């Protein structure tokens, strides 16, 4: 999820968020391809089209958040001005997620939804969407609204697992009382259609290594920018 408004902090120093580190070196090819396709379709405004498409998946995600917190999914949906067709699409995507949840026997740990974590060792922060339990194993859950699955998603998952397993809670400085043992589940809602997809990642140690390199390069990049300002 998004970086908290006041950012991530450790000992009075601001830390970059997971997505900020990855975004500095992110391949924008997927976004450029999407913009090209929208131009071919005659979209009047790429930004307007992007926001309209993204809201279907975002609305479905907000319904899941309400579900986790024991709140009204209907009220969560009404917060988005999607129109009748858009609401039906969001409901369909949400229903598919519920079916997956029942099939896996997932138990969501609502207390740890969108919890702000920091890594004292690598000096970065992150806010995983949710943490759950499947077959007595702790799993990471992350929702995306996109028409595909990209490399940076896996790198982000690896960084979140490190934060859960080795990091601490930003507000208390305490570690979490468990570690991720059952891998990461990426739950994707399509932008333009009421589609739901599930992707499971077990060993993503190579993705964690990639993030470590990104984190190191992030500091070098900041230093070089100062020299060329």
Image (cartoon, rainbow, N blue to C red):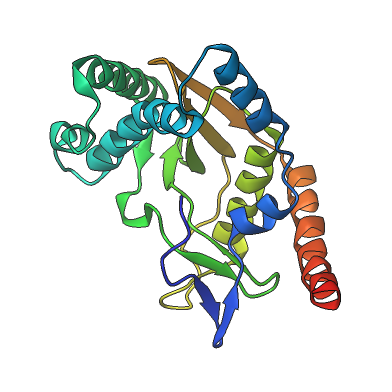
Q: Is residue 61 visible?
A: yes
The residue at 67%/24% (across/down) is 33
Q: Quadrant of residue 106?
A: top left
Residue 25 in the figure: left or right of residue 220 = left
24 vs 155, nearest the viewer: 24
On the image, the x and y values in percent for residue 54 come to: 42, 31
Residue appearing at x 38%, y 16% in the figure: 194
Q: As drawn, is 83 to the left or to the right of 185?
A: left
Considering depth in this image, is 212 or 55 the residue closer to the camera?
55
Q: In this picture, is 131 found above or below 34?
A: below
- Looking at this view, name the residue that lies furthest to the bottom: 12
Measured from the top left, where is residue 24 in percent x and y? 71, 54
For the C terminus, the quadrant is bottom right
**Residue 109 relative to residue 143: left or right:** left
In the depicted view, which residue is nearer to us: 149 or 95? 149
Examine the image and state in which quarter residue 125 appears.
bottom right
Residue positioned 48% across, 19% down in the render: 43
Nearest the viewer among 88 and 170 is 88
């Amino acid at each position: 999820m998004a970086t908290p408004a006041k950012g991530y902090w450790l000992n009075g120093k601001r830390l970059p968020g997971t997505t900020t580190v990855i975004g500095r070196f992110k391949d924008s090819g997927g976004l450029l391809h999407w913009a090209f396709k929208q131009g071919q379709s005659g979209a009047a405004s790429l930004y307007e089209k992007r926001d309209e498409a993204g809201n279907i998946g975002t609305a479905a995600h907000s319904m899941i958040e309400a579900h986790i917190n024991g709140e009204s999914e209907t009220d969560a949906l009404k917060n988005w001005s999607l129109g009748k067709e858009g609401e039906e699409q969001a409901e369909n995507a949400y229903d598919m997620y519920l079916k997956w949840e029942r099939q896996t026997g997932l138990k969501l740990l609502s207390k740890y939804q969108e919890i702000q974590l920091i890594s004292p060792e690598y000096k970065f922060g992150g806010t995983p969407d949710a943490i759950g339990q499947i077959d007595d194993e702790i799993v990471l859950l992350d929702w995306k609204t996109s028409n595909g699955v990209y490399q940076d998603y896996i790198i982000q998952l690896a960084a979140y697992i490190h934060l859960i397993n080795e990091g601490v809670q930003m507000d208390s400085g305490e570690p979490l009382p468990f570690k991720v043992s059952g891998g990461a589940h990426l739950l994707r809602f399509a932008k333009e259609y009421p589609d739901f997809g599930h992707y499971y990642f077990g060993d993503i140690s190579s993705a964690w290594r990639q993030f470590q390199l990104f984190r190191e390069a992030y500091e070098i990049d900041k230093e070089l920018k100062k020299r060329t300002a």
